[in-house]
């Protein structure tokens, strides 16, 4: 077995940190974070294309898009958390949040493997690429 590379240790540290955050946030918090991150990514992409004729300087445009992205993230996260918050009892919410945190990093690793970029830096991603690619 080949030894882990530094990127693999970073993935493991992210998995532990995400699992602990998921344990404290709960499933509703992790779900709200994931949905809000996706919505903010879409808002940032659309905002970047739409704001091109409006802003003359690139850094002003970037700050405006960042501000809009953060507003969208905050609103979507608050709405999703409010609607999903009471669905699970406290112990189950924490356990499912823990599992969602681990799953989030696992999806990042699979996404890295599917992309095929820089696989030589990670043993985990290169092994996953053999199965998903």
Image (tube, rainbow, N blue to C red):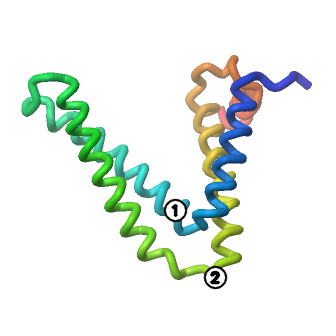
Please state the horizontal and vertical placement of residue 6, each as a whole percent of the image: 73, 23
Report whether 114 appears left or right of 121: left
Please state the horizontal and vertical placement of residue 22, each as a whole percent of the image: 63, 59
Picture quarter with the C terminus: top right
Q: Which residue corresponds to mark 1? A: 31
- Identify the residue shown where x is 64% and y is 73%: 93
Residue 105 makes an appearance in the image: yes
- Identify the residue shown where x is 64% and y is 50%: 18
- Out of 32 and 63, give the one closest to the viewer: 63
- Identify the residue shown where x is 76% and y is 26%: 123
- Out of 131 and 111, give the one closest to the viewer: 111
The crowding category of the residue bearing disc 1, from other C-alpha atoms within 10 Å (few below 14, some 14 to 19, many at least 20), is: many
- Identify the residue shown where x is 69% and y is 32%: 10
Give the tally of numbered discs: 2
- Out of 118 and 132, give the one closest to the viewer: 118
Q: Relative to residue 98, is residue 88 depicted above or below?
A: below
The crowding category of the residue bearing disc 2, from other C-alpha atoms within 10 Å (few below 14, some 14 to 19, many at least 20), is: few
Q: Relative to residue 133, is residue 78 depicted above or below?
A: below
Residue 130 makes an appearance in the image: no
Q: Which residue corresponds to mark 2? A: 89
Please state the horizontal and vertical placement of residue 113, each as a whole percent of the image: 64, 32
């Amino acid at each position: 077995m080949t030894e882990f590379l530094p990127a693999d240790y970073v993935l493991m540290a992210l998995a532990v940190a995400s699992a602990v955050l998921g344990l404290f946030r709960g499933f509703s918090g992790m779900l709200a974070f994931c949905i809000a991150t996706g919505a903010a990514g879409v808002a940032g992409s659309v905002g970047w294309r739409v704001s091109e004729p409006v802003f003359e300087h690139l850094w002003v445009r970037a700050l405006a898009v960042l501000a809009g992205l953060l507003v969208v993230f905050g609103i979507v996260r608050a709405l999703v958390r409010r609607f999903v918050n009471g669905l699970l009892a406290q112990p189950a919410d924490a356990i499912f949040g823990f599992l969602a945190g681990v799953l989030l990093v696992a999806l990042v690793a699979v996404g890295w493997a599917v992309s095929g970029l820089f696989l030589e830096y990670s043993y985990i991603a290169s092994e996953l690429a053999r199965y998903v690619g």
